[in-house]
Amino acid sequence: MTHTESIRQGSAAMIRTAQKNPMQLLAHLAENDPTASKEILFKKWWDKVKNDHHYLLAVGRHAFTNMLNALDRENQSNLSKRKVFDTAATTPSQQEIEIAKNKIVKGSLLSLMLPKIGKPLCKATFKECEIAGGWFGKVAKLGKPGEIVGAKLTNEDLWKI
C-alpha cells in the first residue's frame, strides 16, 4: 500500500496507509458540486465507494477502528466504575457503623410514608395521620388537623412517641 495523506489529522482522520482515501473523494465531490445536499453528496460518494475495493477497505478499517476505540472507552469506563465500587466496599470501623445507623434511624421517621395516603409524614397533615391510624394516629394527637407534621415536629419529637 502507498502512503496517502489525509485531509484532517487526529481521530477523525482516514487511515493514512489506504491506497485511495474516501475523505479526499468526498472533498472532491463537494468541490465539484458545492450546492449539493448532504443526501446527494452521500449518494454520489457511496456509489463510488461501494464499487471500489480500495475505498471500501478504507471505510471498513476506519469504521472498525472507531468501533474498537469506542469499546475500549466503554471497557475503561466500566473498569473505573468497578474500582470505585470496590473501594466503597471496604469495611468501615464499628464507630462509623454506629454513627451511620443513628443517622439512618433518627432521620427516617419524618420520611415514613403514610399508609392509605401515600405521602411522606413530613408533608402530611395531622388529619391525614389520624386517617392512617396506628402509630400515625398517635402523631395526629400532637397537632391541629390542618397543620403540617414536618413544620411542627422534629424526628426527636417523633422518637418520643
Image (cartoon, rainbow, N blue to C red):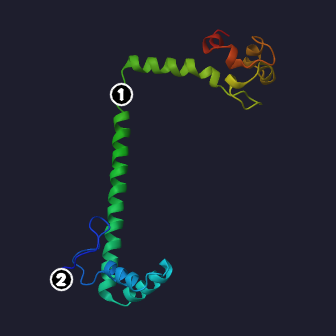
Image quadrant where residue 93 sits: top left
Closer to the camera in the image, 14 or 98: 14
Percent across and percent down for residue 123 are 70, 25
Image quadrant where residue 89 sits: top left
Q: Which residue is mark 1?
A: 91
- Residue at coordinates 46% horizontally, 84% vertically from top-left? 43
Percent across and percent down for residue 150 are 67, 19
Percent across and percent down for residue 103 are 51, 19
Q: Which residue is mark 2?
A: 2
Closer to the camera in the image, 158 or 135: 158
Q: Residues within 10 Å of mark 2 (few under 14, many from 20)?
A: few
Q: Is residue 139 left or right of residue 45?
A: right
State whether residue 84 is above or below residue 36: above
- Screen quadrant of the C terminus: top right
Q: Earlier in the sequence, mark 2 or mark 1?
A: 2
Q: What separation in Å lies between label 2 and label 1 (alpha carbons)?
A: 59 Å
- Residue at coordinates 50% horizontally, 17% vertically from top-left? 102
Percent across and percent down for residue 2 are 18, 83
Q: Nearer the viewer, mark 2 or mark 1?
A: 2
- Screen quadrant of the N terminus: bottom left
Image quadrant where residue 133 sits: top right
Type of residue at label 1? Answer: Thr
Numbered disc 1: secondary structure: loop
